[in-house]
Amino acid sequence: MSNNQARAEALPIYISNVTKTYGKVFALDDVSLDVKQGEFLTLLGPSGSGKTTLLMVLAGFTRPDHGSLKFGDREVIRTPPHKRDVGMVFQNYALFPHMNVAANVGFPLKLRNVPAAELAERVEAALETVQLGGYGQRGIDQLSGGQKQRVALARAIVFEPRILLMDEPLSALDKKLREHMQIELRHLHDKLGMTTVYVTHDQREALTMSDRIAVINHGKLMQLDEPRTIYDFPANTFVADFIGESTFVPVSVSGGKVSYDGATLKTATQPDGATKYNLMMRPERLSFVSGRKPKDVNVFKGTVSELVFQGESFLMYADLSDGTQVAVRGATQKDAMAIVPEVGKPVSLGLHKDDTVLIPDAGDMPA
Amino acid sequence: MSVAESLQAPVGARAEEAPNAAGLKSDAVKERMQLLGLCSPALLLVAVTMVLPVIWLFYLSFLSDEGTFSLEHYQRLTASKAYARIFYTTFQVSVLTTLVCVAIGYPLAYFLAQLPRRAAALCMITVLLPFWTSLLVRTYAWLVLLQRKGLVNTWAIELGLWDEPIKIVHNLNGTLIGMVHIMLPFLVLPVYASMKAIDTDYVKAAANLGASPIQAFWKVFFPLSLPGLFAGALIVFVLCLGFFVTPAVLGGGRVIMVAMSITDTIELFFNWGAASALGVVLLVMTLGSLFAASKLLNLDRILGGGGGGH
């Protein structure tokens, strides 16, 4: 199989009803989700959410209590890790310290009895793919963090697996390099076309890289959607709170009308039955309203309580009349800053009708 | 490069304008002196109990019976075949003990390293327990077990394993059994520690890349545990070289090692010079093996870092 020079077709992954308990705690609680052929899917969640457990189930290192896992048509839930034929990049890279770069990358090929000449060729090709051509004879401890990351990636793709798993591979890198590698990993995925499952707790990373994001919390799948949908239309309070910054304002609903502080709000969607809702406000979707009220904009009045300069943007906190504190993010151009009121001054905040998101209050409001 | 730059920087020229430079420097010196002061009792102890006696030992070994400088003791060592045999036996027993310890100790350490922490701690106590019993007691216990009418022979005959009592003690076998038993913890502890330090992700990564459990062990786990194995084997080997009690009791006079020969030279012949010469040769040989081992280990590290996996 690995002698086949033609690129192997990526495989879809079908996860159904996978459950894993540790004592009485559910690490995975009846998780079902499909990863499409060639898709870049990110498992996103806070630490302890079960996202890594799910990845370990995919790799074969964690044995679930029950459930089914298919790579294409093949049921693999009982297949040992070394027969699954998936590439994996570990969080700490797990490069073998007693082997040099070439031996590390050549390891999976050697196990597959690839002839020496072809092996050397493929190792060099894989290293070139990750822009480390000619680094074969380096020792592992001579590499920087970013280089180790690339070697780990080369080792995971050199045997042309049809599925690639990554466990927070960028978490040990500094911010600049991490952002650079996010783009590079995404380009590499587009080039190689492997079905990729990526685990991270960094929402920005997930939004940047993914075709789709699966948000996981307490071992349950909270939402599975494209990045824009996840961000703009979170399905529940957890997703709304976990992805991006947001403030929740409790609103009352009666007869299909949404009202706050006695005024009826213009909303993008109509509430569908539940009685209690929260209006989600993203700091960057709020604007300052001065003078005449624009059309299709809801206006909230409050008092500025704090102003924080953060370099590329500023963050203003304002207390609404009912005591709810909302955050507003603004650009720091001089003219934009000029209209920002001082602390203690009244302020009018506008939220466009299309930017309103109503989330049913299931009693799981974040503290 | 940065060091060179800082050396070129005109430190002296700026000293006057540098505030508190003199005070900070004297603080650093004071701190170093305090540390030295803390070490001094230990340093003194080592000097008095180790360095001085060794110098004395060297001095004695070059002293003739008449009290003049001579090489006669060393000449006797090289002239007599008996001494060559004693050194041969010493190395033979040490090498065999080390090999058997590795053969038994490595799998034992591997087993312990796989256990959950609590169970491993419990099992480790059983490994260490003999450690806390007197060496002499353990040696005589083996004598009781292994002798002609001992437990091992009686049981084996009753079970029909062999018909006649066989000689398991007062020879090389008995010596090896006793020494392996005593040396085993010295091997198991460093090997266990080095195995525990191996990140389980390495083995997982090997499996993920297609290695069966056996392949993952030999290609990844075993090479990574080698430093601990070498360290343990070296400790056992060096300790064996100077061993006295166990070969003396279980060897039955047939297994003569250097340490026993030194005792005889002093107790029977009262020849301090000859005994010192034996001691010096043993010391030099031990240091020689340590040096050779360190060279070998370093070489291995260089090979492992540069061209490993081939």
Image (cartoon, rainbow, N blue to C red):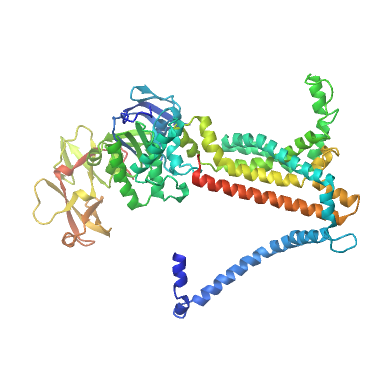
- Toward which corner of the image does residue B58 lie, by quadrant? bottom right
- Asked whether, in this view, residue A254 is left or right of residue A60, the answer is left
Residue with the most extreme front position:
B79
Q: Quadrant of residue B231?
A: top right
Q: Is residue B111 left or right of residue A97?
A: right
- Does the rendering let one see residue A198? yes
The x and y percentages for residue B57 are 80, 58
Q: How many marks?
A: 0
- Relative placement, left or right, of B96 versus B226 is right
Quadrant containing the C terminus of chain A in the rendered view:
top left
- From this view, report whether residue A100 is shown above or below residue A341: above
| Residue A276 screen position, x and y as percent | 24, 37
Q: Residue at x 40, y 43 (%)?
A: A151
> Foreground residue, B35 or A284?
B35
- Percent position of residue A328, x then y: 23, 53
* The N terminus of chain A - image quarter: top left
Extreme-bottom residue of the structure: B16
- Out of B189 and A10, give the one closest to the viewer: A10
Residue A162 to residue A182: above or below: above
Q: Locate residue A116 relative to residue B146 in the image: left or right.
A: left
Viewer-side residue, B243 vs B140: B243
Q: Residue at x 66, y 51 (%)?
A: B291
Q: Residue furthest top?
A: B160
Which residue appears at 49% of the width and 29% of the height?
B212
Q: Residue at x 59, y 68 (%)?
A: B32
Q: Position of residue B123 (x, y in %)?
A: 64, 36
Looking at the image, can residue B136 be seen? no
